[in-house]
Image (cartoon, helix red, strand yellow):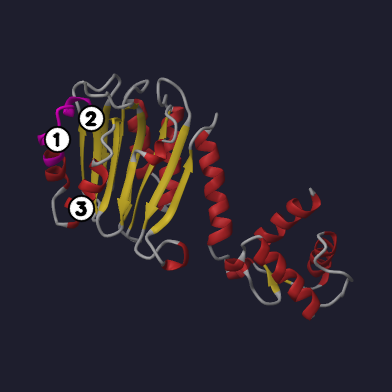
Amino acid sequence: MKMQQPKVATFSIIGHDPATGETGIAVQSKFLGAGAVVPWAEAGAGAVATQSYAETSFGPRGLQMLKEGSEPQAVIEELIADDPDAALRQFAVMNSQGKTAVYTGEECYEWAGHREGRFCTAQGNILTGGDTVDAMVETFEGSRAPLAERLTAALQAAQEAGGDARGKQSAALFVVQESGGYGGYNDRKYDLRVDDHKEPIEELKRLYELHKLYFSKPDPSSLLELKGEVLDEVELLLMKDGLLKVKQDTWNRETQEALRMYFMRENFEERWHERKIDPAVLTYMRADINNK
């Protein structure tokens, strides 16, 4: 007897930014670890979001077809052609140019449906109503923020419009860009998951802000000179943390090495500057050291 696959009742959005070449997916569900099931994406290929009675092979198979030049609608048709559970599936496909196609099987649990927009597509099942997918598309289209922020804002708007009728549990953000990953070695610009949380979208946004803090470079115009009151505060914090033995009252080798040690320990290498400090790191230092 064939075992029935779990219902991945959820709402998701796929988006593309033609200016940066980024493609990404954001998802929320009353389902443990939806980020391990729903989002699939690859720079230069596109993205697939598979949900409802989720067939996870649709992800890699769909991406391979996109890489081979298939149109999104052709990918949809081929994947469901020999699928005995096609009526229970829901999935969306986007190519690397932002063209989309979506399929919602006629036996997906109500409310189920989708809406395609400009460089985006939103879909969901077991929702409170169609307002959820409408909110995702309208929020995405109405923003000029970075792609990751447009996707998470769309999730938030969808939740406020009703969301998953069963409640909240997990969320994920997956954005790809050529050489966009850590060190430029892969395409995973953001791969953030909240597997089980009372407020998964809020937690996802918190993780996103941490990711920016650790891995993005600061605005050079915002950097603070390490002198005067700024240097005084930094030295006191380093002394409290045990990295600096004696207050120097000047920017010298001892202070520099102590601060560099702190940056290395806390993984702030991307935000290191000689004789200047990123105000975001200084804010982090205050909270980190003073609360120990």
Task: Identify whether 32 is placed above or below 143.
Answer: above
**Badges 2 and 3: C-beta atoms under 8 Å apart?**
no
Which label's residue is closer to the chain start, 2 or 1? Answer: 1
Question: Residue 184 at x, y = what percent?
Answer: 42, 67
Which label's residue is closer to the chain start, 2 or 3? Answer: 3
Amino acid type, callout 3:
Gln
50 horizontally vs 105: left or right: right
Question: Residue 120 at x, y = what percent?
Answer: 29, 44
Task: Identify whether 29 is placed above or below 233.
Answer: above
Residue situated in front as seen by the camera: 266 or 138:
266
Residue at 19% of width from left, 57% of height from top?
67
Camera sees residue 189: yes
Residue at 79% of width from left, 49% of height from top?
292
CA separation in Å, label 2 and label 3: 19 Å
- Where is mark 1, residue-wise? 80
Amino acid type, callout 2:
Arg
Q: In which quarter of the image is the N terminus?
A: top left
CA separation in Å, label 3 and label 1: 16 Å
Residue at 63% of width from left, 66% of height from top?
222
- Where is mark 3, residue-wise? 64
Magenta range is 78-89
- Where is mark 2, residue-wise? 89
Judge the density around disc 1: few (<14), some (14-19), many (≥20) Cα neighbours within 10 Å. some
Instruction: Tell me the SS state at disc 2.
Output: strand
92 horizontally vs 228: left or right: left
